[in-house]
Amino acid sequence: MPERSVAHSTFRIERVYDATPEQVFAAFAEPAARRRWFIEGEGWDIESCELDFRQGASEHSTFRFKGGPLIRNDTTYHDIVENERFVFSYTMEVGDNRISASLATVELKPEGAGTRLAYTEQGAHLDGHDNAEQREEGCRQLYEALALELERRRKAA
Amino acid sequence: MTQRSVEHSTIVLERTYDASPTRVFAAWSDSKALLRWGNPGEGWVTGMDRFDFRVGGASSSWFGPKDGDRFVSETHYLDIVPDERIVSASDMTVNGDLRAFVGMLTVEFHAAGHRCRMVMTEQGAFLDGHDMPANHQAGWTKMLDNLGEELASRAAA
């Protein structure tokens, strides 16, 4: 009988990007772009990926890291304000266990010629399978990957 | 031009009810029971348009003063452990399409002798100043009082 517990946490990451709010928003909204910086990465094997960045819509993706257990991400968008803000909830499962449920807010504000992105995650870490520190570190890495994607697009333009 | 802002807040409320975790969980998972106790305002009208209580399912309810503002809440279920835990994400709109709030709710049901210690955590994103944590603190306090009455009135059933 698994020991049930929930640990709640809130963390916030802020990063300034050398891109307009429209360009940063597009990196989330365009499936091909998001797949590149958000889903793909060295060691990650994507088994399925259904993206649908619309208010009220849901997304599902499954993947493995270096041949490990199947990881699943289910996301629902609750609020999207074009080029300004979106709020979504998502759960993560590893093998048979749901490890977390989270509410995430992304706010985009112009800063000089660039954009300040603020990411706030309010999480429920389930049954001791993961913790806020691991999640925050994972998210920081994602927002670094976004910087690389935006730089790549700027050079290609 | 709407001034965009997001206020993040976490509300934790705890109650011990003279009922088993199974009975308290049932009051959260039955649409008729929810309509009886889940009304945050004194004398408000309320209704449920859809109820699909399962992970991946969604429910839709509305409430408000009889001839006043109409609030609609869309809820998506993220995690359900029968008799133990419910995690859901809801968004609330006012009078049509003004989105005021998105939040994630965790409800834990713990056995405490013959009673149930219930812990409710709402992690909220309050949008553009249309809603505030104090409203939710008051609304949930009232609903959890109602839930106590619901459980007591049905104890003999």
Image (cartoon, rainbow, N blue to C red):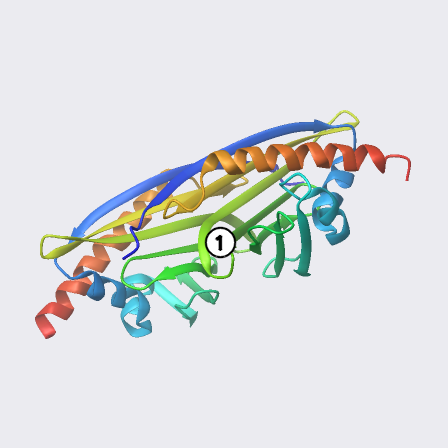
Above or below — where is B89 with respect to B140?
below
* Left or right: B61 in relation to B152: left
Q: Amino acid at mark 1?
A: Thr
Query: Is residue B51 in view from this perspective?
Result: no
Q: Residue furthest front?
A: B67
Q: Secondary structure at mark 1?
A: strand
Relative placement, left or right, of B143 versus B115 is left
- Residue hosting label 1: A91
Q: Is residue B123 visible?
A: yes
What is the x, y in percent for residue A127? 55, 40
Where residue B65 appears, x then y in whole percent? 62, 47
| Nearest to the observer: residue A84 or residue A101 | A84
Quarter of the figure with the C terminus of chain B = top right
Q: Quadrant of residue A53?
A: bottom left
Where, quadrant-wise, is the N terminus of chain B in this rendering?
Answer: bottom left
Q: Is residue A153 left or right of residue A81?
A: left
Residue A94, above or below A52: above
- Please tell me in which quadrant of the rendered image residue B56 appears: bottom right
Q: In x, y percent, where is residue A64?
A: 41, 61
> Which percent across, then down, holds residue B78?
56, 53
In the shown orientation, is residue B47 left or right of residue B136? right
- Which chain letter matches label 1? A
Mark 1 crowd level (few <14, some 14–19, many ≥20, 10 Å Cα): many
Which residue, as the protein is rendered here, is positioned at the far right?
B156
Q: Residue at x 37, y 41 (%)?
A: B7
Count up the numbered dots. 1
The image quadrant that residue B6 belongs to is top left
Identify the residue shown where x is 26% and y is 51%: A141
* Along the viewing direction, whichever of B94 and A65 lies nearer the viewer: B94
